[in-house]
Amino acid sequence: MRAPHSMRERPDAILPSKKDAELATESSRILSALKGDGAFRVQLEGGQELVLPSAVKTLLMHLLTEMSRGNAVTIIPIHAELTTQEAADVLNVSRPYLIGLLEKGELPHHMVGTHRRVKFEDISAYRKKREQQREEAMEELAKQAQEMGMGY
């Protein structure tokens, strides 16, 4: 049996059907309309009420949003270590590009035998840093365009 080639092929990844995606869209809208930061309560079949931490509501909304878009979904613990292919999939870059980031020291990693492993929390921090840099660059471009009277 070969190892999963991408996050989409992980055995625990859930690829929603069209019907699931439609139901996820409807459920996401209902959840987003709920107010309050307290405990999150769910009524189960049979009348039993399940009380969940408020953070579950946020996670569930993210999960439903991705499912509504037809995206495969899996849960990755923050402390998880990923292969280079899995890390590349999370960042939506090619594996060779990711290897370059690792070799330049832009993204920390460690070796397990002859294989590189990258912590999910490091990938997440790298992604946030890149998004912040992109945002700052866009703000600078908008500022320059305003100074030049380009109507932005």
Image (cartoon, helix red, strand yellow):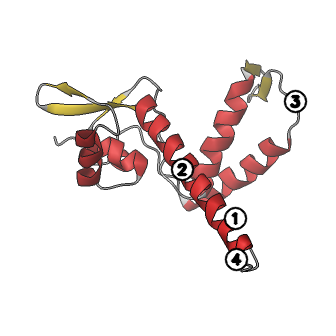
Give the labeled residue for mark 1: 143
Residue at x 19%, y 27% (from the top left corner): 111
- Of discs 2 and 4, which sits in the foreground? 4
Amino acid found under the numbered disc labelled 4: Met
Give the labeled residue for mark 4: 148
Q: Say left or right for 71 vs 8.
A: right
- Of discs 4 and 3, which sits in the foreground? 4
Quadrant occupied by the N terminus: top left
Residue at x 41%, y 48% (from the top left corner): 91
Closer to the camera, 142 or 62?
142
Q: The residue tagged with tag 1: helix, strand or loop?
A: helix
Question: Up-down: is 42 above or below 88?
Answer: above
Mark 3 and mark 2: Cα distance apart in space: 33 Å
Amino acid found under the numbered disc labelled 1: Lys
Closer to the camera, 32 or 141?
141
N-terminal of the two: label 4 or label 3? 3
Looking at the picture, how far across and down is residue 60, in whole percent? 66, 37
Mark 2 and mark 1: Cα distance apart in space: 15 Å
N-terminal of the two: label 1 or label 3? 3
Quadrant hosting residue 70: bottom right
Mark 4 and mark 3: Cα distance apart in space: 46 Å
N-terminal of the two: label 2 or label 1? 2
N-terminal of the two: label 4 or label 1? 1
N-terminal of the two: label 3 or label 2? 3
Give the labeled residue for mark 3: 36
